[in-house]
Structure formats: structure tokens, C-alpha cells
Amino acid sequence: MKYALALICLTFVAGCGVHPPIQGREDPYAAGQIHFNKDDLRTQTAVGRPVATRDDAGILHVTVPIRSAIDKRLYVDYRVTFFDKNGQPLNDQMGWMTKTLEMNTPDQITVSSMTPRAADFQVDFRWAR
């Protein structure tokens, strides 16, 4: 009886131990402004340096040169997220838009923020759905 009681107490004490929290793994890669969800999409397209300008009202306009880098018409989706000066996403993230890229023909996407608070942006690309 003594041993059974000791075993129950020992099990209770061992089960109530405090475990350390599981901490997140730090991402070794810095975030960029242009992201692709698949490597084959990245390799089949050519993307130029984004150009950001502001109009007189302070609205941020972003143009991203892009083209199909293969002898094939491509259909891609893209979305843009705008960030404030503190790096926080603004509520004006647009939904996914579809773009047709003709084979080896230069093209571009142009988007505008909804507010002059936009200080930075990120463009995400995926295969069209």
C-alpha cells in the first residue's frame, strides 16, 4: 500500500513539471519585395527591379516589370501587400489578380496603395488558379 501511494505521488509530481516553451525557429533569410510560391514559376519568369513613385496626394504607385522567360504563354496570380513605416501591413492588401504573360514579351504590373501611409510593399506571385 505504501509503495502504491508513493508511486501515485511520484507520478503526480513528475507529470506537473514545468516544461520550457517551444520557441520559433529564426528565419535565416531576409524578406524581399518579390516572392514566388514555386521555384519553377521563378525560373520561368523574368522580373525586373520594382519602381515605386508617389503622386501629389502621397499615394504609393508600384510598377513591376515581368515577362515569360520561356517560349510559352504563362498565367500567373499576384497580390500586393503595402506596409506602413513601422513595417506593419496596412488593411489595403489587395486580393489575388491574374496576369497573362505572353511568351518572351516584356510586360508589367502596376498597383497603387489606397492610403498615403504606405511606405513599403511586397508582391507575391503564384501560378494562376
Image (cartoon, rainbow, N blue to C red):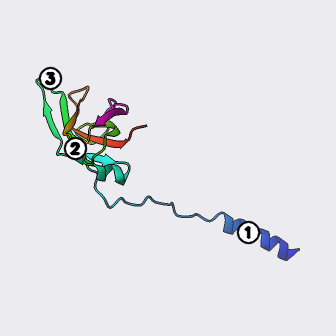
Say whether disc 2 or disc 3 marks the residue closer to the N-terminus: 3
Residue type at numbered disc 2 = Asn
**Quadrant of the rendering where the N terminus is positioned:** bottom right
As drawn, 114 above or below 23:
above
Q: Nearer the viewer, residue 14 or 70?
A: 70
Camera-near label (2 vs 1) is: 2
Q: Residue at x 30, y 58 (%)?
A: 29
Amino acid beneath label 3: Ala
Question: Which residue lies most toward the right here?
Answer: 1
Residue under pointer 1: 11
Instruction: Identify residue for label 3.
Output: 57
The residue under the point 52% across, 64% down is 20
CB-based contact (under 8 Å), mark 2 and mark 1: no
- Residue 50 in the image, given as x and y percentages of width and height: 18, 42
* Image coordinates for residue 94, horizontal then vertical, percent: 34, 31
Q: Which of marks 3 and 1 precedes in the sequence?
A: 1
Q: Magenta part of the protein: which range?
A: 90-101
- Residue on which the image places disc 2: 104
- Please tell me which residue lies in front, 14 or 25: 25
Q: CA distance from mark 2 to mark 3?
A: 36 Å
Give coordinates of residue 122: x percent, y percent: 28, 42
Q: Amino acid at mark 1?
A: Thr
Separation of residues labelled 1 and 3 (CA atoms): 68 Å
**Res. 106 image quadrant:** top left
Report the residue at 20% width, 40% height from top: 105
